[in-house]
Image (cartoon, rainbow, N blue to C red):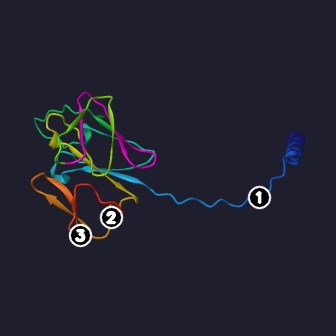
Amino acid sequence: MRSLILCGLQMASALRMMPTVTPRAAATPRATVNMMWHIFPRDGATGMLKNDYWVERGQQQVVGRYDMVEYDGQKMEIAPDQCVMVPAEDGSALYVYAQGQQPTGWRTRPDEPWNWMNPGESVALYSGHKISLDCNYPESAVYKFEKSGMVGTGALPPGWTTGYDQASSQQFYYNQQTGQTQWEVPQY
């Protein structure tokens, strides 16, 4: 009992020594955008890649062998950690780091050749850009990136729709009001 009283006296003494704090006006919270990057197989369910991802700022996503559809006789030269993707702090870009043993490809448009990063190299990519996990068959394992301001919306600005270009096997964007077409995701 004596120790309980002594403890109570010490707490009362400590409270008397604390400085008086004047209340401040409450800070107005800033609006935050829940910026997400959608990383998905370019060819959808018909391609060699089977997983898609939503990645927020402050997270990272590893893609590689375990993202591929397996079949008999398949050579798995792609590392389980072939590529690591990290959104920029401001959400403007996706930093792509080549890992594994083989190069990782990237390109910004479907009509340009693949650029190859060796393990340890990196590049900043943007909405609509692509990576290939397979340097031997680059078109077989392509991920595409799209930036979204809201989780899971993927909504396009008014008047825009998507189309599919048979010649390049790529999705494109078409503005029904202006007739404009482009490879990159239109921004608000």
Name the one closer to the observer, 79 or 186. 186
Asked if residue 110 lies in the magenta stretch, the reply is: no
Q: Which mark is residue 23?
A: 1
Relative placement, left or right, of 143 versus 188 is left
**Rendered residue at 56%/59% (across/down):** 30
Which percent across, then down, holds residue 4?
86, 43
Q: Residues within 10 Å of mark 2 (few under 14, many from 20)?
A: some
Name the one closer to the observer, 69 or 7. 69
Q: Which mark is residue 155?
A: 2
Q: Which mark is residue 178?
A: 3
Mark toward the viewer: 3 or 1? 3
Q: Earlier in the sequence, mark 3 or mark 2?
A: 2
Helix, strand or loop status at disc 2:
loop
Q: Which residues are magenta?
A: 85-109
Asked if residue 93 lies in the magenta stretch, the reply is: yes
* Residue sitting at the far bottom: 177
**Rendered residue at 39%/53% (across/down):** 36
Which percent across, then down, holds residue 12?
88, 47
